[in-house]
Image: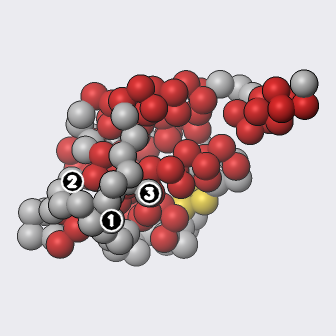
Amino acid sequence: MKESTIRDFFLGKAPAAALALPPSTPAAASDKTRPRAIVIDDLDSTFLVTRPMAAVLCDAAISGEVSPHLLGIVARSLFGSRHFTWEDPLLTEVMGSWSEIGGDHTIPGAGLQDQRNRLLRSESYAKRDLTAAAR
């Protein structure tokens, strides 16, 4: 999976199908193992990932355009890349949960919908949790 393909997906220049791995790629198999990130380092500069971009990826997973397995691979690829950046702890949390997909860990559709809603809210979910815990 090329970094440029992920970037183009986030920019709306590539469909979700472009994220799919060729069947011959070991991580493309939908077995119960947690595959590693597969990234071809082809960007020349950093690319800032935003909440709306992550929400579009989440939408693709909710609709079935991106399998949970592939969502996990994309998330691990974002973490493994030196070119993708974000400055939002909520993105780290949500993509971190996606990176755990594989093995016995899955995120049900309702969980993905909740994550999508959190990504599109203006306040940080963690901040809301801290406020609720203080009561």
Farthest-out residue, right: 134
- Tell me the quarter of the picture where residue 117 sits: top right
Q: Which one is in front in this view, the residue at disc 1 or the one at disc 2?
A: 1
Eyeballing the image, is 8 above or below 55?
below
Q: Are marks 1 and 3 in contact (CB under 8 Å)?
A: yes
Front residue (pair 116, 106): 106
Amino acid type shown at disc 1: Arg
Task: From the image, tell me which residue sits under label 2.
Answer: 20
Q: Which type of secondary structure does the marked residue at label 1 adopt?
A: loop
Residue 26 visible? The answer is yes
Eyeballing the image, is 45 above or below 88?
below
Amino acid type shown at disc 2: Ala
Front residue (pair 4, 58): 58
Task: From the image, tell me which residue sits under label 3.
Answer: 100
Classify the position of the N terminus by image quarter: bottom left
Eyeballing the image, is 69 above or below 113?
below
**Mark 3 Cα-neighbour bin, 10 Å: few <14, some 14–19, many ≥20:** many
Residue at 17% in and 72% down: 26
**Residue 79, image x and y in percent?**
51, 65
Q: CA distance from mark 1 to mark 3?
A: 7 Å
**Residue 128, image x and y in percent?**
78, 29
Amino acid type shown at disc 3: Glu
- Disc on the earlier residue, 3 or 2: 2
Q: CA distance from mark 1 to mark 2?
A: 16 Å
